[in-house]
Image (cartoon, grey):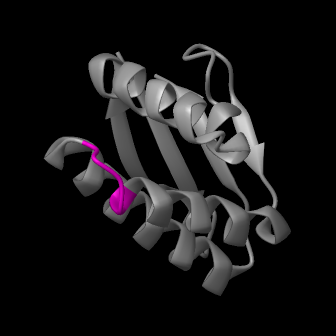
Amino acid sequence: MALDFAVLTEDETAADIVSLEWRQHDVLIALAEQLKLTQLLRIEDYFEEVDWAPGQLPALSEELGIVSNSAATPEIIQFAGDLDALIALAVRRKQRLSAIPD
């Protein structure tokens, strides 16, 4: 089971997705707690759906930059980069980003 971060395509018939596995989630949340990254802590409950409005995405992107510059594992740094690219897509489309347990 993965936690999928999704942005709808422009025609809203599909979604662009970045997935976070359970073990990665544990590492990311521990790091978010240590660094007090409030936007990332919104996904602390792996099984709860979370949405970020377009106006909230810059703060989430900033936190991902902090994660990328921290002592995170290469896996987490890769995830942060992939999610940041998805955030940029959501901003361009003026759409929300959703975290959906799958």
Picture quadrant of residue 13: bottom right
Q: Quadrant of residue 1 in the image?
A: top left
List x then y, in percent, for residue 80. 38, 55
Q: Is residue 96 above or below residue 41?
A: below
Identify the residue at image location x=64%, y=59%: 60
- Vertically, is 75 above or below 29? below
Residue 46 position (above or below residue 66):
above
At a point 35% along the width and 60% down the height, the residue shown is 68
Q: Which residues are magenta?
A: 68-72
Q: What residue appears at the point 35 percent right and 53 percent down from the top-left corner?
A: 70
Q: In the displayed structure, does residue 83 sit left or right of residue 35?
A: left
**Residue 37 appears anywhere in the view:** yes
Residue 84 at x, y = what percent?
A: 46, 67
Residue 10 or 75: which is nearer the viewer? 75
- Secondary structure mostly seen in the magenta stretch: loop
Residue 13 in view here: no
Q: Position of residue 64 (x, y in %)?
A: 49, 59
Left or right, 51 with reference to 83: right
42 lies left or right of 102: right
- Taking the view exactly as shown, the residue that stands out farthest to the bottom is 92
Is 90 magenta? The answer is no
Q: In the image, 93: left or right of 53?
A: left
Depicted 75 relative to depicted 49: above or below:
below
Residue positioned 66% across, 79% down in the render: 91
Q: Nearer the viewer, residue 48 or 34?
A: 34
Q: Position of residue 48 (x, y in %)?
A: 67, 18
